[in-house]
Image: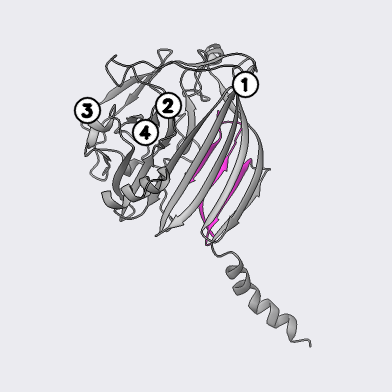
Amino acid sequence: MKHIPALICFLLPALSLHAQKGFSINMQPDKKQADIFYNNQLLTSYCYYDSVAKPVLFPVNTVDGITVTRGYPIDPKEGERTDHPHHIGIWLNYESVNGIDFWNNSPAIPAEKKEWYGTIKHDKILETGSSGKTAFLSATAGWYNNKGNLFLKESSSYHFRIANDVFIIDRTTTLTATKEPVIFKDVKDGFFAIRVARELEMPSKEPAVFIDAHGNKTKVDPSGDNTITGMYYNSNNIKGDSVWSSKAPWAMLKGKKDGKDITIAIFDHPANTGYPAYWHARGYGLFAINPLGRKIFSNGTEELNYTLQPSQSVTFRYRIAIASKDLDKHSVEKLSKEFSGKR
C-alpha cells in the first residue's frame, strides 16, 4: 500500500494535463482579469484594470502562441510604437457619446481635460463556461462621464472557439440608455477594434499626424523596417490604404510574425446598425470597424448621429478570427457566411 502514493504522484501530471485539454478559464479577481486558455496555453485575458478606461481582451495570441497585439502601454516590447496609448488589445467604444470621448481616454490625457473624456467601468462577470473547443464569458459594465454620470449600461458576451486552428471570438454587446437620450455623434473614431503588433503594420515611408476630437495631436513615424509586413484586404477586393473608408461585410489583415503567416479578419453582422459598416483601418496598426461614423468616410455624403431614447437598447455583433496561417478569401468568406447565418 505504501507504494500507491508514489504511483499517484507519478500519474498526477498526466492526469492534470488531460483534464485541461481544450478551453479553460482562470478567474483572477485580485488582478482584475480572467484568463482564457486552450490546451494550457493563454489565448487572451478579459482585463478590467483601473489604469485602462475600458474592458479589453489583452494580449491576443494565436493557437500556437504568437502574440498578434501590441504590448504598449500595458506590456511594452522593444521596438514597438508608443503612439495612441488608448489602443489596447481588442476593445469596443466610441469617440462621441453625448459629447464625451470614450475612445481617446487614457492616462495620457491631462487632468484639466478629463471632463471631456469618459470611462467604461467593468461591473461584474456574470457567467463563464468552457467545454472542449468552445468557451464563453459574459460581463456587465457602465459608460460614465468624468463626473460619474451613467450614460449607458453595457451587457457583453464573448464566445471563444477553435476551428481548424483558427481562434474565433464572437462578441455581442447590448447598450441601453439610462434616464436621458444618448446621441452617438457621427465621428471617425470607433467602434470595434484591435491594435496589432509592430510586424503586422503596413510598411510606410512618410510620417503622419492624427488629431482627436479635442485637438490632441499624435505623430506616427514611418515604419523604416523591412520586418513590417502587413496588408489589408476587404471582401470587395480592395486592398492597402484604400480599405480605410471602404464599406464591406468583412476585412482582413495579413502579414508575418515570428516566422509564420498571420491572418486577422473582422466580420460585420447583417443585424448591426449601418451594415455593412465603414472600415477604420490604419496602416500603423489600428484595425477597426465603425458602424456609427459616416460623414468623414463618405466625404460628407452621409451622416448618422445615432440616438437612443431613455431605456432604449441597441445590440452590436462582431466576429474576429486570428490564425497563424494564410487564410484565403474562400475560407474567410465561409466564416462570414457562418457568422451572418447564411449558407
Pointer 2 or 3: first along the chain? 2
Pointer 2 or 1: first along the chain? 2
**For discs 1 and 3, the disc positioned in front in the rendered view:** 1
Q: Residues within 10 Å of mark 1 (few under 14, many from 20)?
A: some
Could you tell me which residue is drawn at 59 percent across and 36 percent down?
48
**For discs 2 and 3, the disc positioned in front in the rendered view:** 2
Chain part drawn in magenta: 32-59
Using the numbered discs, state the Cα–Cα distance from disc 4 to disc 1 in whole angstroms: 32 Å
Query: Does the residue at mark 4 contact the one at mark 1 (Cβ under 8 Å)?
Result: no
Can you tell which mark lies on residue 286?
Answer: 4
Q: Is residue 88 left or right of residue 153?
A: left
Residue 134 location, x and y as percent? Answer: 53, 55
**For discs 2 and 1, the disc positioned in front in the rendered view:** 1
Residue 111 location, x and y as percent? Answer: 56, 15
The quarter holding residue 297 reads: top left
Q: Is residue 28 left or right of residue 72?
A: right
Can you tell which mark lies on residue 311?
Answer: 1
**For discs 4 and 2, the disc positioned in front in the rendered view:** 2
Q: Amino acid at mark 1?
A: Ser
Could you tell me which residue is drawn at 50 percent across and 40 percent down?
171
Residue carrying label 3: 206
- Taking depth in this image into account, of 55 and 269 the one nearest to the observer is 269
Residue 145 location, x and y as percent? Answer: 59, 17
Could you tell me which residue is drawn at 37 percent across and 52 percent down?
323
Residue carrying label 2: 190
Using the numbered discs, state the Cα–Cα distance from disc 1 to disc 3 in whole angstroms: 47 Å
